[in-house]
Image (cartoon, helix red, strand yellow):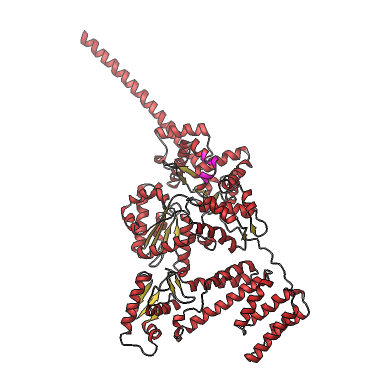
């Protein structure tokens, strides 16, 4: 539930959602979000010195009504009813978002990044609607909080104006600076910026007049001595010092703000746009049920939503979530986690669990249920087509029922924010027409976000200065061809041997299930990077954002790669059995190695014969462990074959002796 206090209090966009007393109570709590507020302080804000005897019950009634409007967990009772605490999420209160944006803008301006500072200051000022918390205007208890918000507003105005001057927009910003200086004449920074903007606009006389006016107002109207900086600026303007001339800020080559096919992670939250309604809905479900399942089709952006959206929001709340995946987290490691009451465990890509043996699944699920029983929150990211597997774990499925959030295609508004937001954050601009072109091509597609992010990354590489252009986008081949072109260009640049190595690597990392859906497989780097050629190939694929790696494991960046790159799809379709044999061999060999290479884990019988035939026919590139596993299996099969032949010969000799004995008995019987 969005709470706006930078102006008259607004709850969820409704200006008339609350009665007068309820508005005051909520305003008091919102003035100190996350802090305990005593009942007598709330009563003081409601009635001043004339506090009635029934004040505690009246405040309690207000809190009950507010909980119905905000949610039962939004206001916590502290000290047996003697105090309350507003427990809304950090991003649900405009004042906290405003303060963050002002701080970021000031830091960027100090770091000589005026383009980005201008964006963040503007984002903060867009939230400002007037004097903050006017419901508490007559309550001294909120004067410090209100004054702090007003001071942040003044700072945001000055940061944006200073950034505009540094960007060369001095002529356009002069009227705004005249207004700012008139509104707060004691803030010297505004007079200095105004004089500098006038000087850079070729109006030296006006700049000097501005400084003289500032000095007169400070001395005569307020009895304040002008600072040394004001006098130094006047001297510099008189001397037309070169230091005052505009120096075009060099465009700082930062990293591309679009991750391509890779999912946005917790650290990428500043660049994650377009899923704000989903984030709010997920937080509300998690608050209500304690267990949340984010469900959607492959490629819809579940991991990005869970990590850069939900988990990052929890970080801003101070809850420090723990993010894991079944493929990289053992049951023992999960058992060692202690999120604690108020903590949250986030399990992304839960579908990976269902490829493990049933016993391991049960142990993993038991640990998830333990986390919930301990009072921690649980967030699951799971592919929609594997929900049937989840239902077989009845206890967990029952807990999930009340916290399902289905992720659908991004809306038109969300897509536009996903295009423009990261660009503006990075100090880039988007050429008119590019946004509409991109939205039209991906609107309604479930895998829109990764494809959009990839083509924007390619467009960024073709940018003109700081501008993402339509021409740059068209040079990538468009949404449908950008991914394929990236992969195909890399493939064609490889030598023939490396092309075959690439085919074997990709079919090891991805497969298709019975429904032809793509399934990613995370494998240890050591198994696919045994020599220099393999390691160099993996590095090239990671650099191209076709693979992702955490240093220990590697996997394809996104399932949508199998749809966008026809060559990979053809590889998967050509050798389904071979790919299945490779995946089974990889798991079996690693298990055999981990158990100390026992003979009981080797391939035997028909499976050993099929895999041996596949190895002779396809000559796959195997790891040392896989090759040793097959060699041992083949050697064991040969031993068993010889032992079988020996037993057969012995049996034949025994049969011959028996037949000879029977013949002799028959002859004697005839005689």
Question: Exactly how many numbered labels are in the figure?
Answer: 0
Query: The N terminus is located in which quarter?
Result: bottom left
The residue closer to the viewer here, 370 or 184, is 184
Magenta residue check for 563? yes
User: Is residue 627 left or right of 109 when viewed as pictured?
Assistant: left
The residue closer to the viewer here, 608 or 577, is 577
Q: Position of residue 332 (x, y in %)?
A: 40, 56
Which residue does the image show at 51% across and 47% down from the upper left? Answer: 560
Query: The C terminus is located in which quarter?
Result: top left
Q: Is residue 410 visible?
A: yes
The residue closer to the viewer here, 554 or 53, is 53
Q: Is residue 6 above or below residue 469?
A: below
The residue at the far right in this view is 239
Which residue does the image show at 63% across and 71% down from the upper left? Answer: 109
User: Is residue 600 left or right of 521 when viewed as pictured?
Assistant: left
Which residue does the image show at 53% across and 48% down from the upper left? Answer: 526
Which residue does the image show at 53% across and 79% down from the upper left? Answer: 150
Q: Is residue 439 above or below residue 597?
A: below
Q: Position of residue 557 (x, y in %)?
A: 52, 50
Q: Position of residue 100 (x, y in %)?
A: 53, 71
The residue closer to the viewer here, 79 or 45, is 45
Q: Position of residue 654 (x, y in %)?
A: 32, 21
**Which of the 4 quarters of the picture holds residue 245?**
bottom right
Magenta span of residues: 561-569
User: Is residue 376 left or right of 494 when viewed as pictured?
Assistant: left
Magenta residue check for 270? no
Q: Main secondary structure of the magenta part?
A: helix
């Amino acid at each position: 539930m969005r709470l706006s206090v930078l102006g008259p209090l607004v709850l969820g966009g409704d200006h008339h959602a609350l009665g007068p007393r309820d508005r005051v109570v909520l305003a008091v709590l919102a003035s100190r979000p996350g802090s305990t507020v005593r009942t007598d302080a709330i009563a003081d804000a409601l009635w001043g010195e004339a506090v009635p005897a029934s004040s505690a019950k009246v405040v309690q009634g207000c809190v009950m009504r507010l909980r119905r409007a905000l949610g039962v967990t939004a206001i916590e009772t502290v000290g047996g009813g003697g105090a309350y605490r507003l427990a809304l999420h950090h991003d649900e209160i405009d004042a906290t978002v405003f303060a963050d944006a002002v701080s970021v803008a000031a830091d960027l301006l100090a770091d000589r990044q005026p383009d980005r500072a201008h964006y963040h200051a503007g984002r903060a000022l867009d939230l400002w609607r007037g004097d903050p918390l006017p419901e508490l205007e007559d309550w001294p208890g909120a004067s410090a909080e209100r004054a702090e918000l007003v001071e942040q507003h003044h700072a945001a105005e000055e940061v944006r104006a200073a950034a505009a001057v540094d960007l060369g927009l001095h002529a356009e910003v002069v009227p705004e600076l005249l207004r700012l200086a008139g509104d707060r004449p004691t803030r010297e920074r505004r007079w200095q910026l105004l004089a500098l903007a006038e000087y850079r606009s070729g109006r030296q006389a006006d700049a000097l007049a501005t400084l003289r006016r500032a000095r007169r107002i400070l001395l005569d109207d307020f009895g304040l001595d002008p600072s040394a900086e004001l006098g130094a600026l006047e001297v510099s303007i008189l001397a037309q010092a070169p230091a005052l001339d505009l120096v075009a800020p060099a465009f700082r080559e930062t990293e591309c703000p679009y991750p391509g096919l890779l999912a946005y992670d917790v650290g990428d939250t500043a660049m994650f746009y377009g899923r704000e309604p989903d984030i709010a809905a997920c937080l509300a479900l998690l608050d209500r049920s304690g267990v949340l399942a984010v469900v959607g089709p492959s490629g819809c952006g579940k991991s990005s939503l869970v990590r850069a959206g939900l988990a990052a929001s929890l970080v801003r709340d101070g809850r420090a979530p723990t993010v894991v995946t079944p493929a990289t987290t053992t049951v023992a490691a999960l058992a060692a986690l202690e999120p604690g009451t108020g903590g949250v465990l986030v399990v992304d890509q839960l579908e990976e669990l269902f490829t493990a043996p049933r016993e391991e699944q049960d142990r993993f699920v038991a640990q998830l249920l333990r986390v919930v029983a301990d009072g921690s929150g649980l967030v699951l990211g799971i592919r929609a087509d594997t929900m049937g597997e989840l239902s077989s774990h009845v206890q967990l499925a029952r807990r999930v029922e009340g916290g399902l959030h289905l992720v659908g295609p991004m809306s038109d508004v969300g897509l536009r924010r996903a295009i423009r937001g990261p660009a503006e954050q990075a100090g880039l601009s988007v050429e008119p027409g590019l946004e509409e072109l991109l939205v039209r091509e991906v609107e309604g597609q479930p895998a829109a976000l990764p494809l959009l992010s990839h083509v924007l990354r390619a467009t960024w590489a073709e940018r003109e200065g700081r501008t993402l252009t339509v021409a740059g986008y068209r040079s990538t081949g468009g949404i449908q061809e950008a991914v394929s072109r990236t992969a195909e260009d890399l493939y064609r640049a490889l030598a023939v041997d490396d092309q075959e190595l690439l085919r074997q690597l990709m079919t090891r990392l991805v497969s298709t299930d019975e429904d032809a859906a793509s399934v990613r497989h995370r494998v240890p780097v050591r198994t696919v990077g045994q020599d220099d050629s393999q390691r160099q190939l993996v590095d090239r694929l990671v650099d191209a954002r076709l693979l992702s790696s955490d240093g220990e494991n590697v996997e394809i960046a996104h399932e949508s790669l199998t749809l966008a790159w026809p060559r990979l799809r053809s590889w998967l379709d050509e050798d389904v059995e071979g790919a299945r044999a490779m995946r089974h061999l990889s798991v079996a060999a690693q298990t055999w190695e981990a158990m100390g290479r026992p003979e009981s884990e080797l391939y035997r019988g028909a499976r050993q014969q099929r895999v041996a035939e596949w190895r002779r026919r396809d000559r796959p590139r195997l790891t040392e462990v896989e090759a040793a596993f097959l060699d041992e299996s083949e050697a064991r099969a040969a031993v068993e074959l010889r032992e079988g032949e020996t037993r057969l010969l012995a049996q034949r000799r025994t049969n011959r002796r028996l037949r000879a004995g029977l013949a002799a008995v028959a002859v004697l019987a005839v005689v």
